[in-house]
Image (spheres, rainbow, N blue to C red):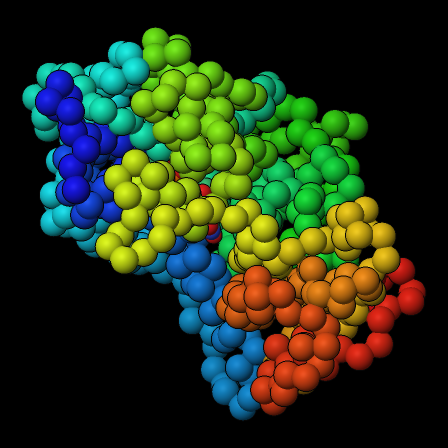
Amino acid sequence: MSTQGPAFDADLFVIGGGSGGVRAARMAASRGARVVLAEAGGVAGLGGTCVNVGCIPKKLYSYAAHYAEAFEESHGFGWQGEPPRLDWARLKENRRNELQRLNGVYQKLLLGSGVEVLFGRARLLDAHTVQVDLEAGGDGTSRRITARHILVATGGRPEVPPFPGREHVLTSNEMFDLDPFPARLLVVGGGYIACEFASIFNGLGSKVTQLYRGPQVLRGFDDDVRAFVGVELVKKGIDLRLNAQVSAVERTAAGLRVTLQGGSTVMVDALLCATGRVPNVESLGLDAAGVAQGKDGAVLVDEQYRTSVPSIHAVGDVTARVQLTPVALGEAMVVVDRLFGPAAGKAPRSMDYELIPTAVFTHPSVGTVGMTEAQARKALGAIDVYRSDFKALKHTLSGSSERTLMKLIVDAATDRVVGLHMVGADAGEIVQGFAVAMKAGATKGDFDRTIGIHPTAAEEFVTLREPVTSGAWRQS
Ligand SMILES: Cc1cc2nc3c(=O)[nH]c(=O)nc-3n(C[C@H](O)[C@H](O)[C@H](O)COP(=O)(O)OP(=O)(O)OC[C@H]3O[C@@H](n4cnc5c(N)ncnc54)[C@H](O)[C@@H]3O)c2cc1C
């Protein structure tokens, strides 16, 4: 189906070839729309943050980091010999090759579905016109294209707060290709990206110090999860300093001297600042087109992802709402269904922000879906909390002191499980399945009636019998 008006060059112009943009472009083209997509990062930018400097490379490096403890733990299972050493250059090269492969897959998918792809930076000239400054390979010229609809899917970028010596600071974008490997790394931040990088580089062999200005890492997560992760990070060897902030950084012959507020210093080889991300809206022409923006320039949208300009929609991180790849994908599909109709025989999709499961790939990892205990108390009043903290079977022989935390929050009035949280191996893999049950309205009674898979950690979620009476989780 094509909704083109004769006056426009395209039915849909997508700005940004990341998670949301690629999905929207492909789906719209599959409905018969004439689609043009611009990506500022060239072929190597296709796939956006997730593929190039986010989810994928980070998870690959997290796997790499897990080997260090796996080699160590294997001794308890009878394996002998010295643990192998990390070849950082090889890891980086293998990652680069895999990402190049993925960039190629994305390009093929786009071209195969009939999307015209332009490599260059796009900006809005008005409500229906985009100018793309083609990158060098495209001979430095620019193209103007008119479109009936425009989708802004430009994502976000890391932001580093100002302090003296800020020029010495790295962001998550640069961490994947560091050269040389940092023997001493300071990670500033307490969010999921900071905690993941601290875990990864700690596992790979850096001496990691992590600073966070707040009282505990992972703000926004369940308080027991936060406390538990804080303890586990320290047990793994991370020097976690809470209520601490950087005041200045200077380069010396011995490395970077980082001065903290209060005057103490830390010497490191590299400093990662993972303290926040802002929408990618610079030079995007949002003003020219009259698109309303909120905090940090985020594009404001309604529940159908319409901006203040009817012909312009926006999805994903540029709207600074739930910043996760599956959410950007879901939003993109809602926009396409709305503009070009749903796929044959299907109802138009909608996006539901309730019960979005998510994982943090720390070591050990976090998996979570639904309300935190504090949110549930506030929203529901009477709740029952079930919690278990145990040593996984594997660690009875591995020699590791790692523990696992599982927690359920149940609405006392309806018996529905409204929050499910885990810290432990493969938490993301485990929580994904429980999220389906919770989406379907599972009650604690349903959990109790479910037979466990033995012996697994996950079976604990269906064998929790007695509610907690003792308040917050404490390290025993
Ligand atoms: C370190 C890290 C780890 C992450 N881990 C996870 C995870 O484990 N799970 C998860 O779900 N999410 C994760 N995320 C978040 C996830 O990557 C984002 O939510 C997702 O990529 C957002 O998709 P998007 O389409 O909004 O933007 P992006 O994927 O960022 O794509 C935007 C694209 O637009 C391009 N662009 C920008 N401006 C222009 C312009 N003017 N013209 C043309 N092109 C332009 C950019 O080059 C980019 O390719 C992680 C993010 C980071 C930084």
Q: Residue 335: image x %, image y %? A: 35, 38
Nearer the observer, 264 or 44: 44
* Horizontal arrangement in the rendering, residue 211 relative to residue 273 (left or right): right
* Horizontal arrangement in the rendering, residue 227 relative to residue 329 (left or right): right
Q: Residue 168: image x %, image y %? A: 50, 27
Q: Residue at x 72, y 73 (%)?
A: 444
Nearer the observer, 95 or 361: 361
Q: Residue at x 43, y 57 (%)?
A: 59
Write down which quadrant ligand 1 falls in.
top left
Q: Does residue 409 lie above or below 252 as drawn?
A: below
* Horizontal arrangement in the rendering, residue 108 relative to residue 186 (left or right): left
Give the residue furthest to the right.
Answer: 470
Q: Is residue 140 visible?
A: no
Task: Please state, as top left, top right, bottom left or bottom right, where the C terminus lies in the image.
Answer: bottom right
Nearer the observer, 298 or 194: 298
Image quadrant of residue 387?
bottom right
Q: Is residue 144 visible?
A: yes
Image quadrant of residue 190?
top right
Q: Residue at x 46, y 24 (%)?
A: 299
Task: Please state, as top left, top right, bottom left or bottom right, where the N terminus lies in the image.
Answer: top left
Q: Does residue 108 lie above or below 406 as drawn?
A: above
Q: Residue 175: image x %, image y %? A: 43, 43
Nearer the observer, 122 or 28: 28
Q: Residue 315: image x %, image y %? A: 41, 35
Q: Residue at x 60, y 20 (%)?
A: 163
